[in-house]
Image (cartoon, helix red, strand yellow):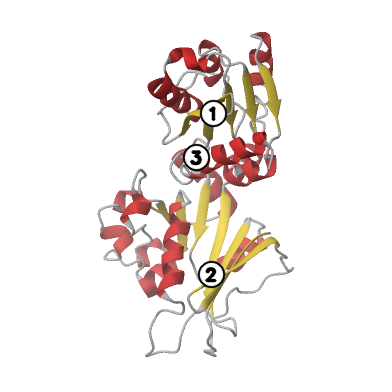
């Protein structure tokens, strides 16, 4: 691994700490390096707080003082921001710190901002290099990029099924198909997203809470929004956890066109990513309208028979790419992109 790749990989590790916490901003990481020595590092923790570059600069100042920053290199997973929003532009912070070189992984997906940092930094005699570990950075930024490209969030369809493709066990048996290890992994999955989407049918049948229940995973972020899709909201049980727990103000009920519902959630709630935890009917509808970007499936080593199946009727198959397989206890997990 080259020196550039080494330091950018470290910045990417910083960025991953912010996944699920920064909406509507992207998760970004940065490290400050001089003469092969790490001076400081940081990640963006929450919208309205300092961006990764400024956190890394502050860390370097605290450890080594202002003078050490002069002539240093800044590695950033995303093109530094060049406009003043809730926080000042990062390009200005880099210029004021007398950084000599900025290396970033990928351009800002917002076409109004893409490439602007290059112009400003170069004008101030700062060397700019980019596209170091670009694909790895773009994987982290998929939700942010999709929102800017389409106005729609990144949608992950989560399913659990038996070997014969069923999503429930026979009546009288445990309600769980998968092991405790797989269920813990779902908690990690929930911590990556801004909203969990389910159906009215699932709420009526299962009374799910759809929360992050592992304290270390929920630390530093709010519970995800919960969106219930129902054409008959008056039939939903008001005693269900989504409507009665301490986060009930983060539960939405919507009916109608799925595309428009998701688009509105981007605008009104500022979401970037959605996890779908629902039955086969809603899963099929989302697939049918090409609204699913990623699939995570947990396969349990059992044959249950009966209904329902993992997805309802769809008119065309959806093939996955970039597939990653892993084992969680007795279960097998598949994660891939559509």
Indicate the secondary structure of the residue bearing disc 2. strand
Tell me the distance, in whole angstroms, between the alpha carbons under discs 3 and 2: 29 Å
Residue at numbered disc 1 = 37
Tell me the distance, in whole angstroms, between the alpha carbons under discs 1 and 3: 17 Å
Please tell me how crowded label 3 is: few (under 14), some (14-19), or many (20+) other residues with Cα within 10 Å. many
User: On the rendered structure, is 50 left or right of 26?
Assistant: left
**Residue 41 point in image, percent of width and height:** 48, 32
| Outermost top residue | 124
Please tell me how crowded label 2 is: few (under 14), some (14-19), or many (20+) other residues with Cα within 10 Å. many
Is there a contact, CB below 8 Å, between mark 2 and mark 1? no
Please tell me how crowded label 1 is: few (under 14), some (14-19), or many (20+) other residues with Cα within 10 Å. few
Residue at numbered disc 3 = 14
Q: Residue at x 58, y 84 (%)?
A: 163
Q: Give the mark nearest the N terminus, 1 or 3.
A: 3
Q: Give the mark nearest the N terminus, 3 or 2.
A: 3
> Considering the image in quadrants, where does the N terminus appear?
top right
Tell me the distance, in whole angstroms, between the alpha carbons under discs 2 and 1: 45 Å
Q: Please name whichever residue, 35 or 319, is drawn nearer the observer in this view of the structure.
A: 35
Q: Please name whichever residue, 271 or 204, is drawn nearer the observer in this view of the structure.
A: 271
Residue at numbered disc 2 = 159
- Classify 330 as above or below 32: below
């Amino acid at each position: 691994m080259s020196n550039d790749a080494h330091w950018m990989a470290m910045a990417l590790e910083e960025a991953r700490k912010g996944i699920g916490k920064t909406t509507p901003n992207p998760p970004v990481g940065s490290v400050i390096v001089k003469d092969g020595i790490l001076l400081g590092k940081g990640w963006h923790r929450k919208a309205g707080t300092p961006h990764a570059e400024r956190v890394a600069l502050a860390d370097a100042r605290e450890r080594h003082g202002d003078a050490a920053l002069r002539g240093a290199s800044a590695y950033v997973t995303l093109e530094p921001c060049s406009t003043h929003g809730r926080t000042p532009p990062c390009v200005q912070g880099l210029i004021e710190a007398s950084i000599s070189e900025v290396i970033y992984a990928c351009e800002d997906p917002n076409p109004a901002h893409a490439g602007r940092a290059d112009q400003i930094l170069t004008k101030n005699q700062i060397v700019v290099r980019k596209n170091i570990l670009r694909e790895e950075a773009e994987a982290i930024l998929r939700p942010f990029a999709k929102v800017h490209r389409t106005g729609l969030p990144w949608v992950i369809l989560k399913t659990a099924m038996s070997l014969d493709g069923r999503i429930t066990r026979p009546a009288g048996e445990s309600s769980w198909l998968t092991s405790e290890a797989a269920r813990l992994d779902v908690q990690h999955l929930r911590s990556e997203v801004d909203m969990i989407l389910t159906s009215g049918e699932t709420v009526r049948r299962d009374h799910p809470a759809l929360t992050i229940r592992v304290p270390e995973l929920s630390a530093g972020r709010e519970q995800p929004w919960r969106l219930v899709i129902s054409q008959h909201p008056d039939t939903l049980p008001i005693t269900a956890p989504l409507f009665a727990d301490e986060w009930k103000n983060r539960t939405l009920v919507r009916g109608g066109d799925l595309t428009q519902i998701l688009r509105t959630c981007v605008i009104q709630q500022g979401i970037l990513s959605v996890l779908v935890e629902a039955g086969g009917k809603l899963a099929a509808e989302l697939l049918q309208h090409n609204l699913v970007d990623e699939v995570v499936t947990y396969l349990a080593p059992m044959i249950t028979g009966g209904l329902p199946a993992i997805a309802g009727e769809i008119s065309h198959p959806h093939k996955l790419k970039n597939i990653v397989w892993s084992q969680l206890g007795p279960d097998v997990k598949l994660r891939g992109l559509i």
